[in-house]
Image (tube, helix red, strand yellow):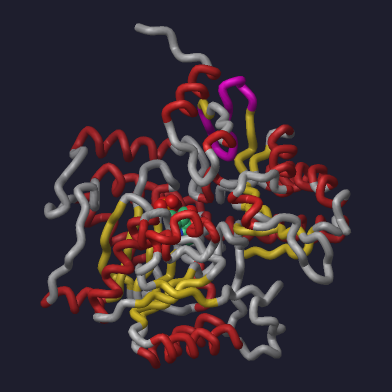
Amino acid sequence: MSNPLSSLEVIALTKKHNYGTWRKQKNWNPSHLLSADGCYFTDGDGKRFLDFSSQLMCMNLGHNNPAVIQSIQDQASTLAYAAPFYATTARAELSKLLLDVLPPGMTKFFFTTSGTDANEAAFKIARMYTGKTKIISRYRSYHGSTSSSIAATGDPRRWPIEPSGKGHGVIFSPEVNCYKCPIRHTYPQCGIACADYLEHMIANEGDVAAVLVEPVVGTNGVLIPPPEYFPKLRKICDDHGVLLIADEVMSGWGRTGKWFAIDNWGVQPDILTTAKGITSAYVPLGLCATTQKIADFFEENYFAHGHTYEAHPMTLAPAIATIHKMQRLGLIDRANEMGAYLGEKLHALKASHPSIGNVRGLGLFWAVELVKDQQAKRPFNTWQEKLDGKPILVEQIAARMLSKGVVMQAWMSHFVLAPPLIVEKAQIDEAVAALDEALILADALLE
Ligand code: PLP
């Protein structure tokens, strides 16, 4: 047997032969992630890190869960693969279980292998069902990296591929952001003008198949709409014969203190997409769920979609184990309880750091947004600087936290705090203390 690779060799080979995502390649300096357990992972030098972003906001059960691991082993030794036109036990059991946890009305499922291709399925289904083309998305959004899903992504990650993204029939509406409203209104006096604006868009665009939303916007800053927003949007969609697609790839699976973020407002989407937490990211699984009304349409109309790995048994079995585990551990309640504790600590942090403009969150999904000045709420960096690979302040702060053993996602002007739902109070204390210390970098740069 050959000698195991050293950490330096692992890093060098990875970097030399793999693309690092969303960056200039020269700016990719991966660390060697060796093993993980619960809320922690260990690197090749044996250093332990508190994972306060659940990797990519996906390991909701934490690392190394025995029940999920066992489900993968059991499925591998029973039926490792079945072509998607077969019925399998895992497929039937998961479908039954999903009826209990998805928002009411979601009854028909298409299983994929990522959030991106769950959204691709959603766009195609919406277009086939309505016979219309356009999809209204929002500027501060992320919906995936393939041609259609990046074209539906509002944040500037679409800029470098914009020419190929054009023609995908996506138009963008302003995000719903009551801290910094893009249409310069103030809640509640606004009367939810952002929804009115969207209705104006639907009426004037014509040919709109669907409105696509992250019910709580994820990477782009944990943006939470006011209580009236979703009921109003649902009515607008119904009045205009437009479908409502809820992208719950990041916000689903207990992250916001409900099974799905849209449950916070009791609104039913027509199509719901999800991935990440569905298996706690132990295996790649995505889901596009629709109402029975949409399902009925395809009884008589050709369902023109499919993948070799659709409903792959190895991805479905761990989803069943994940849902059972979440139910047994009461993780939805725990997300609320620990989320309230985290929120309290973050609001206290804001009081002592003038660089914090806003703290917001639901469940165990929080953002801390930094501003150069409280009045104008100006950010420290621009998107162009990020795309050009220039140093971004939040990334420098994250690097300082990393040196103290805490991992937190830094994105443009904010941090997203999304620990595994099994997080303990002491771990919350540790993460907030690291942020507290590292924020001196931002406070020192205030204007
Ligand atoms: N939609 C949202 C809201 C996401 O946050 C993501 C990924 O972060 C995606 C879609 C794409 O999912 P994936 O990376 O699994 O393709």
Quarter residue 282 falls in: top left
The quadrant of the picture occupied by the N terminus is: top left
Closer to the camera, 382 or 238? 382
Q: Is residue 263 above or below residue 157?
A: below
Q: Residue at x 61, y 67 (%)?
A: 223
Closer to the camera, 89 or 14? 14
Closer to the camera, 431 or 104? 431
Q: Is residue 415 visible?
A: yes
x and y percentages locating residue 85 in the rendered image: 12, 54
x and y percentages locating residue 261 in the rendered image: 51, 67
Left or right: where does residue 441 sit relative to residue 389? right
Left or right: where does residue 120 sit relative to residue 9? left
x and y percentages locating residue 162 in the rendered image: 45, 60
Q: Residue at x 32, y 63 (%)?
A: 288
Q: Magenta stretch: residue 170 in it?
A: no
Bounds of the magenta segment = 35-47
Q: Is residue 12 above or below residue 67?
A: above
x and y percentages locating residue 136 in the rendered image: 43, 76
Q: Is residue 259 visible?
A: no
Closer to the camera, 416 or 314? 416
